[in-house]
Image: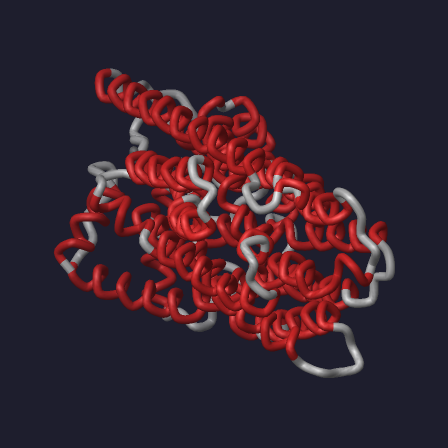
Amino acid sequence: MDEQRHETTALLGPVHPLLSDKEHECLSSYVRKCDRRLMFYLCMGYATDSLNKMALSNAKIAGLTSDLNLRGTDINWALGAYYVGCFVFQLPSNLILKKVRPTYWLSGSIFCWSLVTILTAFVTSARQLIWCRFVFGAVQAGYLTGSIYYISFWYPRHMVRRRMGFFFASAGLGGIWVGPLCSVLTSMDSKWLPWQRIFVVIGAISLLWSLLGPFVLADYPDTASFLSSDEQQLILKIMEHQNTVASTQQVRFVQVKMALLDFKVWLWTAIDFCANAATQVNGMFGPSIIESHGYSPQTAQALTALTNFMAFSGMASIAYTARILRGSSTAIALSNILTICGFLLALCSSNPNVHILALFVFSFASPQPAAHGPAWQMCNLQGNTKPAMAAAMASAFGGLGPLATAFVYRDEDRPQYTRGHLVCLLMTVACFVVTLVLRRVLAKENRRRDLDCGDLEGMSDEQVQDLADNHPHFRYRL
């Protein structure tokens, strides 16, 4: 309780009255309810998203390539089409979330991508497969950015990073399940081909989960029926101080412009871009990398449960590593160093066992910056519209990183995949450099505000709110 009181006091700062013991107890009750209800649904939804994304890489070694007569880079185009769809539709997604009830938007996204995955089982050509993956990316685009934004207006700033850690770690849970599940589905006998069973079953699982959304989720804290009136009043008190009360505010286009012109947002986007390039290697090509070293498709699919467990472990640890290392930037830099070691290991050896070990190393370390980055960004942004726009920018442009990955891991490079490993190594180095630059920029701005607190006299309440994280009392977390 003392630790929570200290963090809450640090969050609210001297311009806000301290919380009483009763309010601390009320806040603890509020957080428990939100974790058990909202976070659980969001995390399991993101786990099913991971299942659906990884369905293609597992279907590839289950006969998809030969049955559809895929040639050359057809499979690479199918993998890349998903990220193009995400890019095109992700920027407006969070702005739409301001107009549409979050309950329907988030659960509806899961429902739509589930249908697309099921329909992918019935494609008959490379062109149809590519279009299905593009549409899958388009309908899935709103879930990640929408969930990140949704979390930011349910939890106080100091609690966001840990919830982001749980959320991103849930993708690893989906990865742990998908390998053994696909191995079983590939081994079964039925009227459908093995790769068709993979798409149908995985799509059906996430479709069933989507139907629970309207009954589990709530739109905003002040309209949630599962909260007591005391809990609603307390969280509104905290969120009003943070300027993150989503239910009573409209889209502020001045804040949209602020996000677009804020170079710090673009640095976070660059971190996301570089980090995601390496993060998706295991998800897109893990089964192929393992199979290229002589394993059967079923064994390769089963072994990906271990590499995805490493990814899950890495992402689940981000809230704790950030606290131990006293900042997200240090945690990102450390995971970058581990990722670099993994790719160097793969590049410097031709031993199959060393390659599998390298896959384990960068599967553990590479997802961490991709999870730390959005968490670091969201706890450093204020306003009712700027965080949503910034999250969409980072997710859309940052999501293009795996597009490069999709085309540099080619079957002709098996089993070394030198080109792919080298590109991801360079991306990770770039992520490391940009992280250090951004940390320096934020620290310098904090020092400037310590010396000059600014003058708000003569500004209206609306103008003060539109300052967002440029408010002179706001301090960036490193």
Residue 466 seen: no
Q: Is residue 415 left or right of residue 455?
A: right
Q: Is residue 26 left or right of residue 45?
A: left
Above or below, 260 against 86 in this view is above
Residue 11 seen: yes
Instruction: Say which quadrant the N terminus sits in.
Output: bottom left
Viewer-nearest residue: 191 or 109: 191
Residue 470: x and y, percent?
40, 26
Q: Is residue 61 left or right of residue 191?
A: left
Looking at the picture, the colour scheme in use is: secondary structure
Quadrant of the image occupied by residue 10: top left
Above or below, 93 against 41 in this view is above
Viewer-nearest residue: 386 or 332: 332
Residue shown at 40% from the left, 42% from the top: 342
Viewer-nearest residue: 6 or 393: 393
Instruction: Say which quadrant the C terminus sits in.
Output: top left
Residue 20: x and y, percent?
17, 57
Residue 420: x and y, percent?
57, 37
Quadrant of the image occupied by residue 418: top right
Above or below, 432 against 229 in this view is above
Residue shown at 53% from the left, 56% from the top: 290
Check the image and name the residue furthest to the left: 2
Count of numbered marks = 0
Residue shown at 47% from the left, 71% from the top: 225
Residue 196: x and y, percent?
75, 70
Above or below, 141 against 426 in this view is below
Residue shown at 83% from the left, 59% from the top: 68
